[in-house]
Image: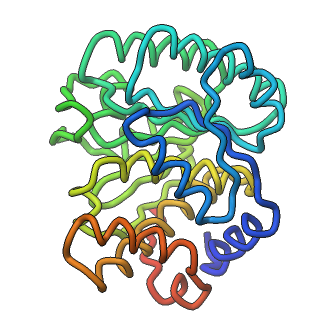
Amino acid sequence: MKNTSKIYDIVEKIREQKPVVHHLTNWVTIYDCANIVKVLGGSPIMAHAPEEIFEITSIASSLVLNIGTLTVDFVESTKIAAKTANLKKIPVVLDVCGAGASRLRNQKVSELIEYASINIIKGNGSEIASIAGENVFTKGVDSTETGLNLIKVAEKLAVEKQCIVAITGKQDIVSDGKRTFMVKNGHELLSHIVGTGCMATSVIGTFAAVEKDLVVAATGALALFGIAAEVAAESTNLPSSFKTKLFDVLYSIDRQTIEKRLNLEKIE
Protein backbone atom coordinates (compact mmCIF):
# COMPACT_ATOMS: atom_id res chain seq x y z
CA MET A 1 0.00 0.00 0.00
CA LYS A 2 2.49 2.58 -1.17
CA ASN A 3 -0.20 5.10 -2.05
CA THR A 4 -2.13 6.29 1.00
CA SER A 5 -4.88 7.56 -1.31
CA LYS A 6 -5.78 3.92 -2.03
CA ILE A 7 -7.87 3.66 1.14
CA TYR A 8 -10.09 6.58 0.22
CA ASP A 9 -10.34 5.28 -3.35
CA ILE A 10 -11.84 2.09 -1.87
CA VAL A 11 -14.24 4.16 0.26
CA GLU A 12 -15.38 5.99 -2.88
CA LYS A 13 -15.94 2.66 -4.66
CA ILE A 14 -18.11 1.47 -1.78
CA ARG A 15 -20.17 4.65 -1.87
CA GLU A 16 -20.61 4.35 -5.65
CA GLN A 17 -21.24 0.60 -5.95
CA LYS A 18 -23.19 0.04 -2.69
CA PRO A 19 -22.12 -3.63 -2.52
CA VAL A 20 -24.32 -6.20 -0.78
CA VAL A 21 -22.42 -7.65 2.19
CA HIS A 22 -24.06 -10.82 3.45
CA HIS A 23 -23.51 -11.72 7.12
CA LEU A 24 -24.03 -14.82 9.18
CA THR A 25 -22.90 -13.19 12.33
CA ASN A 26 -22.91 -12.70 16.06
CA TRP A 27 -26.40 -12.01 17.49
CA VAL A 28 -24.88 -9.80 20.20
CA THR A 29 -23.48 -7.36 17.64
CA ILE A 30 -25.57 -7.92 14.51
CA TYR A 31 -27.25 -4.49 14.64
CA ASP A 32 -23.94 -2.65 14.92
CA CYS A 33 -22.41 -4.73 12.13
CA ALA A 34 -25.31 -3.84 9.83
CA ASN A 35 -24.98 -0.16 10.72
CA ILE A 36 -21.23 -0.03 10.14
CA VAL A 37 -21.69 -1.40 6.60
CA LYS A 38 -24.52 1.05 5.96
CA VAL A 39 -22.65 4.17 7.08
CA LEU A 40 -19.75 3.19 4.82
CA GLY A 41 -22.14 3.06 1.88
CA GLY A 42 -22.66 -0.68 1.58
CA SER A 43 -25.86 -2.70 1.75
CA PRO A 44 -25.91 -5.17 4.67
CA ILE A 45 -28.05 -8.28 4.75
CA MET A 46 -28.19 -10.72 7.67
CA ALA A 47 -29.86 -13.90 6.41
CA HIS A 48 -29.27 -16.96 8.62
CA ALA A 49 -32.03 -19.36 7.52
CA PRO A 50 -30.47 -22.28 5.59
CA GLU A 51 -33.47 -22.35 3.23
CA GLU A 52 -32.51 -18.97 1.70
CA ILE A 53 -28.74 -18.81 2.21
CA PHE A 54 -27.89 -19.96 -1.33
CA GLU A 55 -30.11 -17.28 -2.91
CA ILE A 56 -28.94 -14.46 -0.66
CA THR A 57 -25.24 -15.30 -0.89
CA SER A 58 -25.59 -15.48 -4.68
CA ILE A 59 -26.53 -11.78 -4.89
CA ALA A 60 -23.82 -10.59 -2.49
CA SER A 61 -20.40 -9.11 -3.27
CA SER A 62 -18.81 -10.55 -0.12
CA LEU A 63 -19.64 -12.88 2.77
CA VAL A 64 -18.88 -12.22 6.45
CA LEU A 65 -19.02 -15.13 8.91
CA ASN A 66 -18.72 -14.62 12.68
CA ILE A 67 -18.93 -17.46 15.24
CA GLY A 68 -19.47 -15.24 18.28
CA THR A 69 -22.83 -16.81 19.16
CA LEU A 70 -22.05 -20.20 17.73
CA THR A 71 -24.42 -23.17 17.63
CA VAL A 72 -23.99 -26.43 15.73
CA ASP A 73 -26.91 -25.53 13.42
CA PHE A 74 -25.42 -22.09 12.79
CA VAL A 75 -22.12 -23.62 11.68
CA GLU A 76 -23.97 -25.81 9.19
CA SER A 77 -25.52 -22.65 7.73
CA THR A 78 -22.11 -21.00 7.48
CA LYS A 79 -20.85 -24.00 5.52
CA ILE A 80 -23.65 -23.58 2.96
CA ALA A 81 -22.92 -19.87 2.68
CA ALA A 82 -19.16 -20.34 2.35
CA LYS A 83 -19.50 -23.02 -0.35
CA THR A 84 -21.93 -20.79 -2.25
CA ALA A 85 -19.52 -17.86 -1.99
CA ASN A 86 -16.73 -20.07 -3.34
CA LEU A 87 -18.96 -21.10 -6.22
CA LYS A 88 -19.83 -17.47 -6.98
CA LYS A 89 -16.19 -16.41 -6.51
CA ILE A 90 -16.90 -13.80 -3.86
CA PRO A 91 -14.56 -13.30 -0.87
CA VAL A 92 -15.28 -14.97 2.48
CA VAL A 93 -14.24 -13.26 5.71
CA LEU A 94 -14.30 -15.36 8.89
CA ASP A 95 -14.18 -13.81 12.36
CA VAL A 96 -13.04 -16.56 14.73
CA CYS A 97 -14.68 -14.77 17.66
CA GLY A 98 -14.09 -16.67 20.90
CA ALA A 99 -11.82 -19.30 19.38
CA GLY A 100 -9.74 -20.87 22.12
CA ALA A 101 -12.50 -20.50 24.71
CA SER A 102 -13.98 -23.97 24.20
CA ARG A 103 -13.32 -27.22 22.37
CA LEU A 104 -16.58 -26.83 20.45
CA ARG A 105 -15.50 -23.50 18.97
CA ASN A 106 -12.09 -24.82 17.96
CA GLN A 107 -13.62 -27.94 16.43
CA LYS A 108 -16.24 -26.07 14.43
CA VAL A 109 -13.82 -23.42 13.18
CA SER A 110 -11.50 -26.19 12.03
CA GLU A 111 -14.39 -27.91 10.25
CA LEU A 112 -15.43 -24.73 8.47
CA ILE A 113 -11.90 -23.87 7.33
CA GLU A 114 -11.44 -27.38 5.97
CA TYR A 115 -14.89 -27.49 4.35
CA ALA A 116 -14.66 -24.29 2.32
CA SER A 117 -12.12 -21.77 1.09
CA ILE A 118 -11.82 -18.87 3.54
CA ASN A 119 -10.14 -15.79 2.08
CA ILE A 120 -9.59 -13.74 5.25
CA ILE A 121 -9.39 -15.11 8.80
CA LYS A 122 -9.68 -12.39 11.42
CA GLY A 123 -9.43 -12.44 15.20
CA ASN A 124 -7.59 -11.04 18.18
CA GLY A 125 -4.19 -12.33 19.19
CA SER A 126 -5.26 -15.26 21.34
CA GLU A 127 -8.05 -16.31 18.94
CA ILE A 128 -5.70 -16.45 15.96
CA ALA A 129 -2.97 -18.13 17.99
CA SER A 130 -5.49 -20.79 19.03
CA ILE A 131 -6.51 -21.41 15.42
CA ALA A 132 -2.82 -21.65 14.54
CA GLY A 133 -2.44 -24.50 17.02
CA GLU A 134 -0.65 -22.60 19.78
CA ASN A 135 -1.33 -23.52 23.40
CA VAL A 136 -3.29 -20.43 24.44
CA PHE A 137 -6.58 -19.70 26.19
CA THR A 138 -9.11 -17.06 25.20
CA LYS A 139 -11.02 -15.30 27.98
CA GLY A 140 -14.50 -15.37 26.47
CA VAL A 141 -14.27 -13.15 23.40
CA ASP A 142 -11.53 -10.91 24.84
CA SER A 143 -7.90 -11.32 23.90
CA THR A 144 -5.48 -12.70 26.44
CA GLU A 145 -1.72 -12.18 26.46
CA THR A 146 -0.05 -14.90 24.41
CA GLY A 147 3.63 -14.07 24.78
CA LEU A 148 4.00 -15.04 21.11
CA ASN A 149 5.41 -13.20 18.11
CA LEU A 150 2.05 -12.50 16.49
CA ILE A 151 3.63 -11.39 13.22
CA LYS A 152 5.17 -14.85 12.85
CA VAL A 153 1.89 -16.49 13.92
CA ALA A 154 -0.03 -14.53 11.26
CA GLU A 155 2.50 -15.28 8.52
CA LYS A 156 2.65 -18.99 9.35
CA LEU A 157 -1.13 -19.42 9.50
CA ALA A 158 -1.58 -17.46 6.25
CA VAL A 159 0.79 -19.83 4.45
CA GLU A 160 -0.74 -22.97 5.98
CA LYS A 161 -4.34 -22.00 5.18
CA GLN A 162 -3.53 -20.12 1.95
CA CYS A 163 -5.45 -17.07 3.09
CA ILE A 164 -5.00 -13.62 4.56
CA VAL A 165 -4.78 -13.41 8.34
CA ALA A 166 -5.78 -10.25 10.23
CA ILE A 167 -4.95 -9.95 13.92
CA THR A 168 -6.53 -7.03 15.76
CA GLY A 169 -5.22 -5.43 18.93
CA LYS A 170 -3.32 -2.32 20.00
CA GLN A 171 -1.58 -2.71 16.68
CA ASP A 172 -3.27 -4.67 13.90
CA ILE A 173 -1.37 -7.17 11.76
CA VAL A 174 -2.37 -8.27 8.25
CA SER A 175 -0.45 -10.90 6.28
CA ASP A 176 -0.77 -13.28 3.37
CA GLY A 177 2.54 -14.90 4.29
CA LYS A 178 4.47 -12.79 1.79
CA ARG A 179 3.24 -9.27 2.44
CA THR A 180 2.78 -8.20 6.05
CA PHE A 181 1.51 -4.86 7.34
CA MET A 182 1.11 -3.39 10.80
CA VAL A 183 -1.67 -0.84 11.33
CA LYS A 184 -0.89 1.52 14.19
CA ASN A 185 -4.12 3.52 14.11
CA GLY A 186 -6.82 3.11 16.76
CA HIS A 187 -7.88 4.21 20.23
CA GLU A 188 -8.26 2.58 23.63
CA LEU A 189 -12.00 3.38 23.75
CA LEU A 190 -12.55 0.65 21.18
CA SER A 191 -11.76 -1.89 23.91
CA HIS A 192 -14.49 -0.50 26.17
CA ILE A 193 -17.37 -1.27 23.81
CA VAL A 194 -18.76 -4.72 23.03
CA GLY A 195 -18.67 -5.48 19.33
CA THR A 196 -15.95 -3.26 17.91
CA GLY A 197 -14.04 -6.36 16.79
CA CYS A 198 -17.14 -7.63 14.99
CA MET A 199 -17.66 -4.22 13.42
CA ALA A 200 -14.05 -4.19 12.20
CA THR A 201 -14.71 -7.53 10.50
CA SER A 202 -17.74 -6.04 8.74
CA VAL A 203 -15.60 -3.14 7.53
CA ILE A 204 -13.11 -5.68 6.15
CA GLY A 205 -15.97 -7.49 4.41
CA THR A 206 -17.19 -4.24 2.89
CA PHE A 207 -13.73 -3.33 1.60
CA ALA A 208 -13.28 -6.86 0.22
CA ALA A 209 -16.54 -6.49 -1.71
CA VAL A 210 -14.97 -3.87 -3.99
CA GLU A 211 -11.19 -4.41 -3.73
CA LYS A 212 -9.72 -7.53 -5.36
CA ASP A 213 -6.36 -7.33 -3.57
CA LEU A 214 -7.55 -8.68 -0.24
CA VAL A 215 -4.37 -7.75 1.62
CA VAL A 216 -5.02 -4.16 0.62
CA ALA A 217 -8.71 -4.54 1.52
CA ALA A 218 -8.05 -5.92 5.01
CA THR A 219 -5.23 -3.50 5.77
CA GLY A 220 -7.14 -0.50 4.48
CA ALA A 221 -10.29 -1.46 6.37
CA LEU A 222 -8.48 -1.77 9.69
CA ALA A 223 -6.60 1.48 9.09
CA LEU A 224 -9.83 3.32 8.29
CA PHE A 225 -11.55 1.88 11.37
CA GLY A 226 -8.62 2.91 13.55
CA ILE A 227 -8.49 6.42 12.09
CA ALA A 228 -12.22 6.84 12.66
CA ALA A 229 -11.74 5.78 16.29
CA GLU A 230 -9.02 8.40 16.76
CA VAL A 231 -11.20 11.15 15.33
CA ALA A 232 -14.25 10.07 17.34
CA ALA A 233 -12.24 10.03 20.58
CA GLU A 234 -11.34 13.68 20.09
CA SER A 235 -14.98 14.57 20.76
CA THR A 236 -15.64 12.39 23.82
CA ASN A 237 -14.04 10.11 26.39
CA LEU A 238 -17.24 8.19 27.15
CA PRO A 239 -18.02 4.80 25.49
CA SER A 240 -21.64 5.43 24.46
CA SER A 241 -21.09 8.78 22.78
CA PHE A 242 -17.83 7.46 21.29
CA LYS A 243 -19.71 4.67 19.56
CA THR A 244 -22.21 7.11 18.05
CA LYS A 245 -19.43 9.41 16.94
CA LEU A 246 -17.57 6.46 15.37
CA PHE A 247 -20.51 5.87 13.02
CA ASP A 248 -20.70 9.58 12.19
CA VAL A 249 -16.98 9.79 11.38
CA LEU A 250 -17.09 6.74 9.10
CA TYR A 251 -20.10 8.21 7.29
CA SER A 252 -18.34 11.52 6.59
CA ILE A 253 -14.65 10.53 6.37
CA ASP A 254 -12.65 12.35 3.70
CA ARG A 255 -9.39 11.77 1.87
CA GLN A 256 -7.47 14.44 3.78
CA THR A 257 -8.28 12.92 7.17
CA ILE A 258 -7.08 9.50 6.05
CA GLU A 259 -3.86 10.78 4.49
CA LYS A 260 -3.05 12.96 7.50
CA ARG A 261 -3.58 10.24 10.10
CA LEU A 262 -2.62 6.97 8.41
CA ASN A 263 0.00 5.17 10.50
CA LEU A 264 0.98 2.05 8.59
CA GLU A 265 4.16 0.01 8.52
CA LYS A 266 5.18 -2.65 6.04
CA ILE A 267 7.04 -5.45 7.81
CA GLU A 268 10.08 -6.55 5.83
Give residue 2's position: percent from left, percent from top: 62, 75
Quadrant position of residue 176: top right
Q: Is residue 46 above or below residue 200?
A: above
Give residue 262's position: percent from left, percent from top: 47, 79
Name the one closer to the observer, 160 or 167. 167
- For the point 43% across and 33% down, the residue is 27
Name the one closer to the observer, 1 or 74. 74
Q: Is residue 253 left or right of residue 51?
A: left
- For the point 82% across and 24% down, the residue is 87
Tell me the quadrant of the picture where the N terminus can be found.
bottom right
Name the one closer to the observer, 213 or 237. 237
- For the point 53% across and 82% down, the residue is 258
Q: Is residue 180 visible?
A: yes
Q: How is the image coloured?
A: rainbow
Quadrant position of residue 159: top right
Q: Is residue 174 left or right of residue 178?
A: left
Q: Is residue 50 left or right of residue 112?
A: right
Give residue 247's position: percent from left, percent from top: 47, 68
Q: Is residue 142 left or right of residue 255?
A: left
- For the point 48% across and 77% down, the residue is 249
